[in-house]
Amino acid sequence: MSTGGQAQARTAPDAATLARFQAQMLPHLDAAHNLARFLCRDADTAEDIVQEAFLRAFRGFADFRGGSSRAWILAIVRNCHRSWWQARQRSVRTEPLDAGGEDDSGEERTDLPHDEASPEATLLQRAEAGEIREVLGSLPEAFREVLVLREMEDLSYREIADATQTPLGTVMSRLARARALFAAAWKNRQAPAGGKA
């Protein structure tokens, strides 16, 4: 018990550390939530994962050696998601992780920029954003993850490699495969709606 107290005393943040953490990590809060939301497919769980990730990041901020703070915090979000997933698998082995009807809970993330857009245009934007979320949600996790990090969070290949702890070549091949899977799923989804000629 004394070792825990010593560790806590050793890592107690000062005002400068707190200010540095806020300046470097808090700007990535939306990106962290976005990644968590696409990984776990549940808004409430995503909030819990992000909260845990930022707590872990704050506790381990002394170990942050510079580089991309965005990649660092997203790697922690990813690890927190994995921990949540493993705990869920241990506690509930019969229920698959399928958001089913939960996709509507992501409605608040459809706040796409639409300066003075008509109600019809806004409705179409929201419908398309929902379809994109559904197609993304149908991809296997490894592909969904790199696609979100690259296309939605605009991370470089190197930052994605750092965040996912995978080789750069693997990131590039996963991203190519993810784009192909997304395009095929999108095309299949659009085909039954009527072929536009």
Image (tube, rainbow, N blue to C red):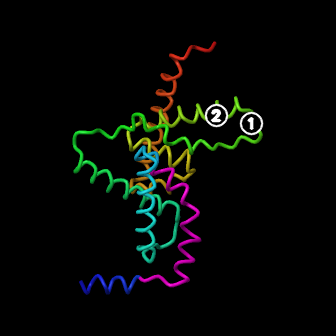
Image position, residue 188 (x, y; %): 48, 22
Q: Is residue 33 magenta?
A: yes
Q: Residue at 57% of width from left, 14% of height from top?
A: 195
Task: Answer with mark 2 or mark 1, whichever residue precedes in sequence.
Answer: 1
The C terminus sits in image quarter:
top right
Q: Residue at coordinates 59% horizontally, 63% vertically from top-left?
A: 27
Q: Residues within 10 Å of mark 2 (few under 14, many from 20)?
A: some
Q: Secondary structure at mark 1?
A: loop
Q: Quadrant of residue 139?
A: top left
Q: Residue furthest right?
A: 116
Percent across and percent down for residue 46 are 44, 52
* Amino acid type of the residue that numbered disc 1 sits on in the rendered structure: Ala
What's the mark number on residue 156? none
Label 2 vs label 1: CA separation?
A: 10 Å
Circles 2 and 1 in contact, beta carbons < 8 Å: yes
Query: Which residue is labeled 2 in the image?
Result: 125
Main SS of the magenta part reads helix
> Mark 1 = which residue?
117
Magenta segment range? 12-36
